[in-house]
Amino acid sequence: MAKELWKGNEAIAEAAIRAGCDCFFGYPITPQSEVPEYMSSHLPKAGGVFVQSESEVAAINMVYGAAGAGMRAMTSSSSPGISLKQEGITYLAAAELPCVIVNVMRGGPGLGTIQPGQGDYFQATRGGGNGDYRTVVLAPSNVQETADFVQEAFDIADQYRSPVVVLADGLIGQMMEPIEWRPVPKRPLPAKDWAASGKKGRDHTNVINSLFLNPEECDALNRRLTAKYAEIEKNEVRWDTASCEDAEVLITAYGTPARITLTALDVLREEGIRAGLFRPVTLWPFPERALRDLAAEPHVKVILDVEMSSTGQMLDDVRLAVEGRKPIRYLGRAGGIMPTVEEIIEAAKTALKEAQ
């Protein structure tokens, strides 16, 4: 299959179109503005609807309406814009509406910088809105994965009737790489007989709602959501590893830092230090058991978590998974600065020395 050169953000948009996206609602914000720009030109040609909303709040509520009518709906933004969408996302989760939400992260907090960041991990994996809910979070580390994950995200959303987040840092959105447009494995999807799209032969009208004034009804909703999230944890957890079979230094990272780490592994091994990479692909559900089992191996002496975050956010999940079995160290850069190969090498050496 021939490869084509694509910019990350444009690949996101094209992947959504190829996945059958019916409606896109968004608002420009760096570093993801090429997503709505591409959609504005190409989605209508494919028979879909593009709307540049007046705000991020409006965009996510348009997604709610379109998803409620049974459409494949999508929005994208970057960190501050995703923050504005949080109320709508919790409504979508409560109403059990499938949709795809892409966050091309920038540095923060606040308006921060337009450079890449990973400070939205808590927001994506813990839920930035109110109440008890989860969203599947896919974390690509290159443009190929980004295109693949966006296409698959629509099927995951439809299968579980849940919002799915594709979480990419700004570098992935802005870089260009050769990719293949390959078919995404299809899954059996349930009929959208719940959609508020008219009776269509039914003897009742479907209602989409996230308001449950009766506490017993609200409790029943939460129990149903909890059961669904347990099913997602059972079926959808993913991770990737590199050189972990004998690693004495186990590095955890996702997104761009994971790619940088791959180069650091080569250098460290050339210098006689056995280093490996554990990369969560689903940030939620987090591959907790896989990391726990790997950390328990006797050859692992120390774990180094690397992120584009000042104090570490995935670091919390790493600690929870490892359960104190091995010492954990952290290397983080923020504000749009990425950890360098040299910094990762030095941090790995220091972590191993302290653990010996």
Image (cartoon, grey):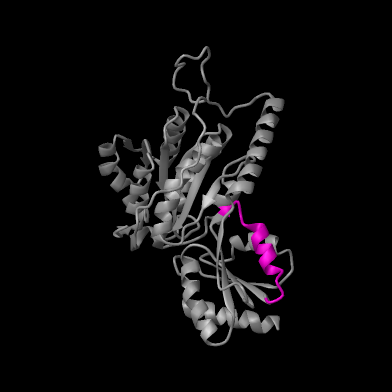
Rendered image quadrant of residue 162:
top right
Q: Position of residue 185 (x, y in %)?
A: 46, 47
Going 42% across and 37% down the picture, which residue do you hit? 73
Q: Nearer the viewer, residue 243 or 93?
A: 243
The answer to which of 233 and 212 lies nearer the viewer is 233
Look at the image and tell me in which quarter the N terminus lies.
bottom left
Q: Percent position (x, y) of residue 328?
A: 67, 71
Quadrant of residue 59 within the rendered picture: top left
- Give the residue at the far right of this rendering: 324
* Point 50% across, 67% down: residue: 258
Asked if residue 114 can be seen in this view, the reply is no
Q: How many marks?
A: 0
Compared to 119, does 261 lie above or below? below
Q: Viewer-proximal residue, 268 or 221?
A: 268
* Range covered by the magenta-colored residues: 283-299
Left or right, 172 with reference to 138? left
Q: How far across and how far down the image is residue 255, in percent?
A: 48, 62
- Regarding residue 227, the answer to whether it shows in the image is yes
At 64% from the left and 78% from the top, the residue drawn is 248
Let me know if residue 122 is in the magenta part: no
Instruction: Look at 39% across and 53% down and name the residue there.
Output: 147
**Left or right of 69 in this view: 234:** right
Q: Position of residue 91 (x, y in %)?
A: 54, 35
For residue 247, above or below residue 191: below
Magenta span has 285?
yes
Quarter holding the C terminus?
Answer: bottom right
Q: In the orientation shown, which residue stands out farthest toward the bottom? A: 271
